[in-house]
Amino acid sequence: MLVSSGLITTAQLNEALELQRSSGGKLGQLLIHKKFIEERRLLEFLSKQFGIEFIDLRVQNIPIETLNIIPENIARRYNLIAVEKVEGKLKVAMEDPLNIVILDDLKMMTGYDIKPVFGTDSDIVAAIDKNYGSKSSKDALDEILRRTDGGTTEVAVVPEDASNGGGEDFISLEEKGEAAPIVQMVNLIISSAIKAHASDIHIEPTYKDTKVRFRIDGVLHAQPSPPKKFHNAIVSRLKIMSTLDISERRLPQDGRTKLKIDDREIDLRVSILPCGPGEKVVMRILDSSGLKLRLEDLGMEPENLAIFAKCLKAPHGINLITGPTGSGKSTTLYSALATLNAPDVNIVTIEDPIEYNLEGINQVMVNSDVGLTFASGLRSFLRQDPDVIMVGEIRDFETMSTAINAAMTGHLVFSTLHTNDAPGAITRIGMMGIEPFLTSSTLLMVVAQRLVRSICRNCKETYEVKPELLVSLGVSKSILDNHIKNGKIILSRGRGCDLCAKTGYKGRTGIHEILEINDAIRGLIIEKAHVSRVKEAGRKNGMITLRESALRKLFTGMTTVEEVIRVTGSDVD
């Protein structure tokens, strides 16, 4: 019906069906994922076919008494929202109004007959955040402070019962208001960060106040902050949660804790650093429910994806992922392992720490206190009959040498390295003291990657720019010639809306530079050639640079000029 209506082509349908046969999933979601059709157009089409109303939640005002019929945790769990009461029935916006089980549960829970309507996934999430979050974080914080003794600077925090599975339900604690003020304050900060899809929480003391910032899509955003007098109590509470020493304030400490929010388990990695005005806390949020493990979701160009998939099928060798902290290296590694994970493949990893638990894969965490390092763990793995080995990071000669020995004895090895680009990894390996002939005979590919923010789909708009502007920013004329129409170039940007917190961005996607090690590159490695010659040879072999990868996403309307400059400013020839 979509084909006959002209919304998709037969070729697009066949491609989506083939993907469905290989990886599963709903056909509609696959069509949206492949960008063959927009989610809104698909749901409007289904609305007509099924005779079920489609509602635009972006312009819908929901009465508070209607909203409160369905609790927030239920709305978030099933991704739905009550819209209005019509003739004794409750109209509920859902992405899948045909889910009879959820409809029956809602009827039993609310006592209303349910009238389901179509709503897009992104609109429902935005409506939940907007309506249930109508009381701002600042208002909530002010309310907590009003119930707090103004003279208190330290609060004794009782350790939680270790038998409860590792954490509390922070959302429910925030709703019930039963926790002590300091506990509530910490809960509010963490739950607000998770709702905002932040990757990190920064709690920083200054000599005058305490600052709270969330890293969202790679950029820090200031948040409502508690008074400075509560800083020590907040840090103590976080130490208790992470089983750290609350009496030690002179040395850095690292810990982790597990929280349960609705039915999701969230891991927090907690780092505490003593500074002049007090202790600074940075928490990394690890939410396995948001982990994407399909190679197609990494944002690779077709050429890069083909090279990546080819090197995954190699019987032995080393594949390296490079990039700074927070560039998505772990996600790429986990995606590669998930692709290879099968009953007839033995996969072992050594990580520091284990960020996500993958079923069917043997994961070991580094413990330097007992001598379990990357190198020693890797040596032990060779006696475990592995097919695939993943080393969290290669930092020294011993680990690199052991990884090369593993590759030479028939194992496929994955690891990360800290370099600015893919060709630079070869120089870095040489600086570790590895002989060039060993590198050339075992290295399969080097992937350099970064993350750029994606334009918010809800407020996306197009605009025209003159080619001269992009030339002045370092974009080559040859690239521009392919995108000029009537003397101008059409780009995209986000206006800013409630869904993207007025930033114009929502989510991130990867840009990649993949250096495949062919005979020409091997010859240069043996010669100890300068990195510029290696890069030139890679370009001749079809290597797409980080800047070129970002520009492709710019011209296809996925990101903005500002993001290309911010992330790849140094990647200019």
Image (spheres, rainbow, N blue to C red):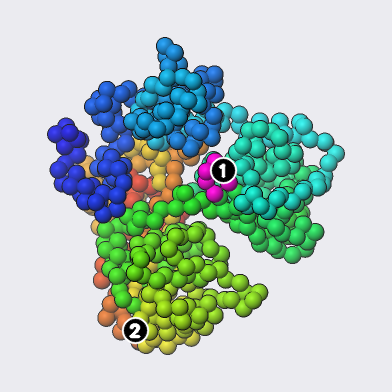
Q: Is residue 176 left or right of residue 56?
A: right
Eyeballing the image, is 259 above or below 386? above
Task: Single out the residue that lies furthest toward the top.
Answer: 87
Q: Is residue 76 left or right of residue 335?
A: right
- Residue that numbered label 2 is attached to: 441
Say which element carries label 2.
Answer: helix
Q: In the rendering, at what x and y percent does residue 273 appear? A: 70, 60
- Residue that numbered label 1 is attached to: 261
Residue nearest the viewer, comparing 185 with 472: 185
What label sits on residue 432 in the rendered view?
A: none
Eyeballing the image, is 11 above or below 124? below
Can residue 34 be seen in the rendering of this structure?
yes
The magenta stretch spans residue 11 = no
Residue at position x 26%, y 54% from top? Answer: 22
* Residue type, numbered disc 2: Ser
* Residue type, numbered disc 1: Ile
Can residue 546 be seen in the rendering of this structure?
no
Residue nearest the viewer, comparing 165 with 124: 165
* Quadrant housing residue 343: bottom left
Quadrant, the N terminus:
top left
